Image: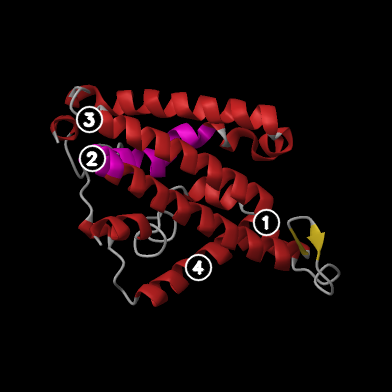
């Protein structure tokens, strides 16, 4: 049951985008079309799975003082592999995602799970966490992009939808529409979870690379935590 909870909590209760509010920039940028959203979700999940497994396996070998740079190097390696595969087999998707594909390296979801979970748990549990968080990220992108594409463009996955194709609300494909849908989904998840989703105060600051900058921790504490 514990492992089942680890696998499923990323979908609703600890959804990386709608609850933990991580990866907001790519979520808003690529959620204008369902095809782009699925591509980004699968790519991020693959990187998350690979990095979580490697970081968990090497957690006792990586020196604590340089763990963040080591994590970034490992994540960058997986991102490079994924990017090369996408370029080779899905050039249209690579062109559509543009800069956001290589920017998975600095996606807070990837680094956050490495620091908060993979660094403290076994390989199998870390893999389950990666799959669950990746599924939550992908489903969120799919729902956001479907709403924005169907209502904002009158299409879904390139297929025209009768009536909506000629009566679409174009603002939903723009930045204001993205923020509007994002806010509505956050409210919906909060309603579904009935307040059981973890609050920001329940998470420590030691897992955040920007902890020293915001004044919550001193620079020496960030290294020693």
Looking at this view, is 198 or 51 the one in front? 51
Secondary-structure class at tag 3: loop
Q: Which residue is mark 1?
A: 174
Q: Quadrant of residue 66?
A: top left
Q: Residue 15, position in %: x, y?
A: 40, 58
Q: Which residue is mark 3?
A: 59
Q: Quadrant of residue 211?
A: top left
Disc 4 versus disc 2: distance between alpha carbons?
32 Å
Q: Are marks 3 and 1 in contact (CB under 8 Å)?
A: no
Work out which quarter of the rendered image holds the C terminus and state it.
Answer: top left
Work out which quarter of the rendered image holds the N terminus and state it.
Answer: bottom left
Name which of mark 3 and mark 1 comes first in the sequence.
3
Q: Residue 79, position in %: x, y?
A: 50, 29
Q: Tell me what residue is drawn at x 35 percent, y 43 percent.
A: 127
Asked whether residue 114 is drawn in magenta, I would say yes
Q: Is residue 190 visible to us here?
A: yes
Name which of mark 1 and mark 2 comes first in the sequence.
2
Q: Tell me what residue is drawn at x 28 percent, y 63 percent.
A: 198
Disc 3 versus disc 1: distance between alpha carbons?
42 Å
Residue 203, compared with residue 68, is above or below; it is below
In the picture, measured across the screen, residue 213 lies left or right of residue 105, that is left
Q: Nearer the viewer, mark 3 or mark 2?
A: 2
Q: Are marks 4 and 2 in contact (CB under 8 Å)?
A: no
Q: Main secondary structure of the magenta part?
A: helix
Secondary-structure class at tag 2: loop
Disc 4 versus disc 1: distance between alpha carbons?
17 Å
């Amino acid at each position: 049951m514990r492992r089942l909870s680890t696998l499923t909590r990323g979908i609703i209760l600890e959804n990386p985008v709608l609850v933990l509010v991580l990866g907001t920039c790519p979520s808003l940028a690529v959620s204008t079309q369902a095809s782009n959203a699925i591509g980004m979700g699968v790519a991020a999940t693959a990187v998350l799975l690979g990095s979580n497994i490697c970081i968990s396996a090497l957690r006792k070998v990586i020196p604590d003082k340089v763990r963040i740079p080591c994590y970034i190097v490992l994540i960058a390696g997986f991102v490079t592999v994924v990017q090369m595969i996408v370029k080779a087999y899905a050039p249209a998707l690579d062109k559509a995602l543009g800069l956001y594909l290589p920017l998975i390296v600095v996606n807070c979801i990837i680094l956050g799970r490495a620091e908060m979970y993979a660094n403290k748990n076994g390989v199998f549990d870390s893999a389950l966490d990666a799959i669950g968080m990746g599924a939550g990220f992908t489903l969120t992108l799919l729902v956001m992009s479907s709403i924005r594409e169907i209502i904002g463009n009158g299409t879904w996955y390139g297929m025209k939808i009768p009536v909506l194709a000629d009566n679409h609300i174009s603002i939903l494909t723009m930045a204001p529409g993205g923020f509007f849908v994002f806010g509505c989904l956050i409210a919906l998840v909060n309603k579904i979870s009935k307040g059981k989703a973890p609050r920001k105060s329940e998470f420590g600051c030691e897992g955040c690379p920007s902890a020293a900058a915001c004044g919550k921790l001193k620079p020496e504490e960030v290294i020693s935590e």
